[in-house]
Image (tube, helix red, strand yellow):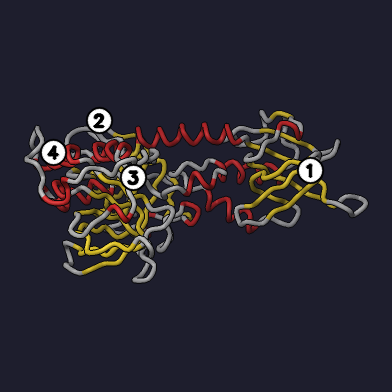
Amino acid sequence: MNVRHPKLAVMLLILVGATLLSPTMLRASALQGAQASSPSGKVLGTVTAIQGNSITVKTDAGTTSTATVNDSTRMLRTAPGQKSLAGATKIQISDLAIGDRVLVILAPATDGSSIVATTVVAMKQSDITEKQHSEEADWQKRGAGGLVKTVDASIGTVAIASGNKTVTIKTTPSTVVRRYAPNSIKFSDATTSTLDQIHSGDQLRARGERNADGSEVAAEEIVSGSFKNIAGTVVSADPAQNTITVTDLTTKKPVTLKANADSQLHKLPVPMAQMIAARLKGGATAGPQASGSAQNGPPAGARQPGAGPGNGGNGNNSPGDLSRALQRAPVIQLLDLHKGDAIMVVATEGNSDTTTIVSLLAGVEPMLQASTSASQSMFSASWSLGGGDAAAAAQ
């Protein structure tokens, strides 16, 4: 099929980019930008209702539009990742389903009584989900992450601390670079960025080809942000206010953090924490039984968390060890935390009123006793960027 409408092809590229919504792709921001700049007569969003020959579409900004499909409406289905309408197939309104992503070009009906869709370009929700799973698996396989040590924008490299290792991220002009907003953990709030906006101490994820020993990554994509990394002990928890106060082991000062629906809270089982601690110490077996709050087992009935993009590193002291452990670790609530519990937290930079928990890991006392800095670096390389935002954006 030849593309006869250049503007439609451009909008299709926007739709394609906006719907590859794995947690690591950050294309929700591109979608919002496209929607904001789209002229009237174009709607980009998700199908929320189909009644007879009309479809209702909700944009990512929350507005809804309903349009009529008639015999002259051009309806096409394309797959995620396609760069043009070549290969798109013709469909009928009966082929659409709630949850599908669509670009609809609108025009007033001749009688002025309704809005008619002249063109509908759709991506099936099932196709998007399959693409997401594929890309999430690729981030697990070819991803690397940690805390930024140095940045050399002149030669396009970033050095990160990943557990006890230093990994050099190499970029090219084609590397996609994005950055999180200072007070948000949502991918939809991330924007296109450059290497010179990355600073020492930032969180960073990269995806690309690694060399044999994993010390270098030829990055295809980079995601970075300024987040707080806190290791400390619980002073108090207030589930009613969704807040927790922690004594930072570095500053010795109390820090109050807020949890929201996207915050990820987990607790490592004691044997797993001891095993990781032994590896941080360079030992081959688990160390002695940890004392204090770390001996408390995971709460009964805790659900299993979903896998997110992490680091697929290999070997001892690897963030991949903790990444895999986090995928199996039970999810907890703030009310499961008690005074004196040892925790590690990644939180938004924000300010004193808006600092929000991105990820919290309890049961880490053996790890902090082994090495606080290495434990924090390992944790920073393993947490899943963005919480549940990607899943929500796909709906």
From the viewer's perspective, is the residue at label 4 or at label 3 nearer?
3
Of tags 4 and 1, which is closer to the observer?
A: 1
Q: Quadrant of residue 46?
A: top right
Mark 3 or 1, closer to the camera: 3
Q: Is residue 159 visible?
A: no
Which mark is on residue 279? 4
The amino acid beneath tag 1 is Ser
Per the image, the residue denoted by label 3 is 331
**Residue carrying label 1:** 54
The image shows residue 89 at horizontal and vertical percentages of: 70, 28
Q: Quadrant of the N terminus?
A: top right
Q: Nearer the viewer, mark 2 or mark 4?
A: 4
Report the disc number at residue 212: 2
- Give the residue type that dot 2 points to: Ala
Is the residue under label 2 in contact with that under label 1 (CB below 8 Å)? no
| Crowd rating for badge 3 (residues with CA inside 10 Å; few <14, some 14–19, many 20+) | many
Q: Amino acid at mark 4?
A: Arg
How far apart are the alpha carbons under marks 4 and 3?
24 Å
